[in-house]
Amino acid sequence: MIQPGDVLSNSQVSETFGVGDRGGMRSSLKNSCLIIISDPTKPLFDDRWEGETLHYTGEGKLGDQTLTRQNRALAESQSSGMDLHLFEVLTKAEYVYAGQVDLCDAPYRDIQFDDEGKPRSVYMFPLRLKEGGIVPELSMEQIQAHRKIRQQILSSETVDALRKRAQQAKNRPQTRATISIQIVRDEAVSEYVKRAANGMCDLCGNPAPFKNHKGAPYLECHHLTPLAKGGDDLMYNAVALCPNCHRKMHSINNASDKKSLLERIARRDEAKS
């Protein structure tokens, strides 16, 4: 029997519960269960956690949602006695079992955007975890991946369309636990590259934009191959950048900029040897 936290494939979900292999809600009359899948890697539906309650968006990709089919089955689950099992897809094709849930309050209406980017009325279902259930933890990499998916979709929309979406933003952002691994850098490497830069950005060549509280030029240590991706915390992999260039490297990581920085490192350390 699966336990909260177990990761299944799509076919395993179907085989375990005797349901189909498509859709965000999949029911089995034989097993009297409804499988509910929240998938932030497909950002059409704006589900959100509030503590141990998931506010889950009903089915229907176009136009106003109706209280029919699986939406109706979920709305009537308390009276029908149907078991509700919740999965969350944090990485594509990986279904994390959160556990059994109950509909803890009446479904309510909300405004979201359909598959054509048009505002529409949806049903939201408050689903509370039963004892033993878990809110799956996100890694920072998964958060960034989900954010990038949304940014790609939004980047093609008009300013007016974005304004309509922004008007529907929630007052308070969603919060949830994350898996975090902290990397402890060697401060000698960081201090060396900043000191060796002599107050000038290693990329743009301009002076540091301001001084820190100690009166030293403010520059930031950047690793050409990120430490989180196996890069060495050594001076041949590190440079000192102004905040603007540092953000540029993390956002764009242009090959020609990286080549310039490698040449800068070679000149710097050759001069110091």
Image: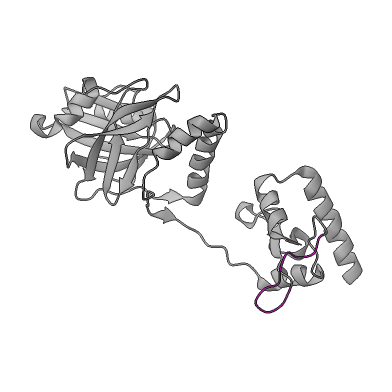
Instruction: Give the magenta range.
Output: 206-216
The mark tally for this picture is: 0
- Asked if residue 125 shows in the view, the reply is yes
Whether residue 82 is in magenta: the answer is no
- Prevailing secondary structure of the magenta residues: loop
Quadrant of residue 2 within the rendered picture: top left
**Residue 137: image x %, image y %?**
39, 50
Is residue 12 or residue 259 the one in the foreground?
259
Where's the N terminus, which quadrant?
Answer: top left
Q: Nearer the viewer, residue 164 or 207?
A: 164
> With respect to residue 52, does 78 lie above or below?
above
Give the quadrant of residue 58: top left
Residue drawn where x is 49% and y is 30% of the image: 161
Nearest to the observer: residue 86 or residue 7:
86
Magenta stretch contains residue 215: yes
Residue 147, compared with residue 51, is above or below; it is: above
